[in-house]
Image (cartoon, rainbow, N blue to C red):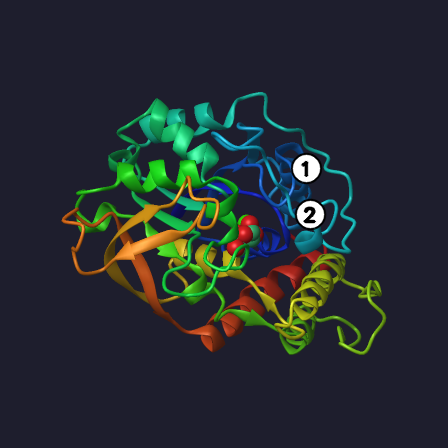
Amino acid sequence: MTRLLLDVDTGIDDALALAYLSSLADVELVAVTASPGNVDAIQVARNTLSILELCGRDGVEVAVGAESPLAIPLVTTPETHGPHGLGHAVLPEPRGTISPRDAVDVWVEAVRAQPGELTALITAPLTNFAMAIRREPRMPELLKNVVIMGGSFYYQGNTTPTAEWNTHVDPHAAKEVFQAYVGLPRDRLPIVCSLDSTERMEMNPEHVRRLAAAAGCGKEELVLPGQPEGLRSTSDNELIRHLSDALRFYFEFHRLYGQGYIAHVHDYFAAGVAAGTLSCTTRLATVDVETDSPLLKGTTVADYRNLWGKPPNARIVSSNHPAAAFDELVSSLGALAARRGQGHD
Ligand code: RIB
Ligand code: CA
């Protein structure tokens, strides 16, 4: 059983990651916390509750913590994920409610109660995680493993020419988190799924068609570049319908920025690494983050050659397998959608 503590900024690819993790019988979602990022933290939490309920994971604790980055104002990205964070999808209002507990309390109490048992997956700016480490400096030792989606190493950014979104939203939090891991043993260091690996995860309309087919949908799910923007899915499967509407927005966004009618599903890849279902190789590095330069704020830098004379603090993903990853997504999430469509789990 993989027991996960998640921090998300649900968003379209966070939602896909949550749906995928919900499809895995041997994954327990211990709790999910919401960091402000793609949308504000309350909206993140509501989106998360809704997607988990759609996937049959009612009752998972969803809590909020920080409402803004550690030291700079929050900037959200409605252009990337839509005004409410899930593209064109309009999910049912969540039946569950946001936990009264603060996200940092959720993390600190969980790792203290279950030392060495929980894997952390962060697919958001690192605000809540940094605050949890401030509160409990032993966090790196108390967690079994950590997977972070964030950063970009010797690869173009997606928010500025050098910076990736999660580290750009809260560069101070990212800097603090990486600093907390300097010098720890290799197997304690965070696995970092940065753009250089996550942008290889190009989801496309054929993947959506295959996912719907795996869910047993009555008709083909066609999300095509020539269709009107915002066309809503009429799939007979509720989960497929919402994922299709969300991903269509993401395809439209990537096309608008010259990347083709595809979607980089960054967080899905990180989720598979955390769940142990997607393989990858990693490379030790010492990572630091620019927090002050107006030109380079949020930029992550990896020292692979000990030029700084500082011990490693990260295991950066150096290779992955996109085709196998999408086969896994179609198979596992398609089966969940089929079960949900038949009124099961
Ligand atoms: O840069 C990609 C990351 O930023 C993903 O986690 C996406 O959801 C956004 O939060
Ligand atoms: Ca995210």
The Cα–Cα distance between marks 2 and 1, rounded to whole angstroms, is 8 Å
**Residue 161 rendering spot, x and y as whole percentages:** 50, 60
- Which kind of residue does numbered mark 2 sit on? Gly
- Residue 123 seen from this side: no
- Contact flag, marks 2 and 1 (Cβ < 8 Å): yes
Image side of residue 194 versus residue 52, left or right = left
Determine the secondary structure under disc 1.
helix
What residue is drawn where x is 49% and y is 42%? 125
Q: Within 8 Å of ligand 2, the CB of disc 1?
A: no
Q: Is residue 342 left or right of residue 18?
A: right
Name the residue at the front extreme. 294
Q: Position of residue 193 (x, y in %)?
A: 40, 58
The image shows residue 228, relative to residue 98, as above or below, that is below
Residue 224 in the image: above or below residue 2: below
Placement of 13 over or under 94, stated as above or below? below
Residue drawn at x 52%, y 23% is: 102
* Residue holding disc 1: 43
**Circle 2 — which element?**
loop
Closest to the observer: 180 or 275? 180
Q: Amino acid at mark 1?
A: Gln
Task: Give residue 205's quadrant in the image.
Answer: bottom right
Q: Nearer the viewer, residue 94 or 126?
A: 126
The reply, left or right, for residue 233 in relation to residue 330 is right
Q: Residues within 10 Å of mark 1 (few under 14, many from 20)?
A: many
Within 10 angstroms of label 2, few (less than 14), some, or many (20 or more) residues?
many
Residue 6, image x and y in percent?
Answer: 47, 42
Q: Is residue 137 visible?
A: yes
In the image, the residue with mark 2 has its CB under 8 Å from the nearest atom of ligand 1: no
- List the residue tagged with mark 2: 85
Which residue shows up at 68% across the image and 32% down it?
A: 96
Return the x and y of residue 248 as percentages of the image width and height: 73, 65
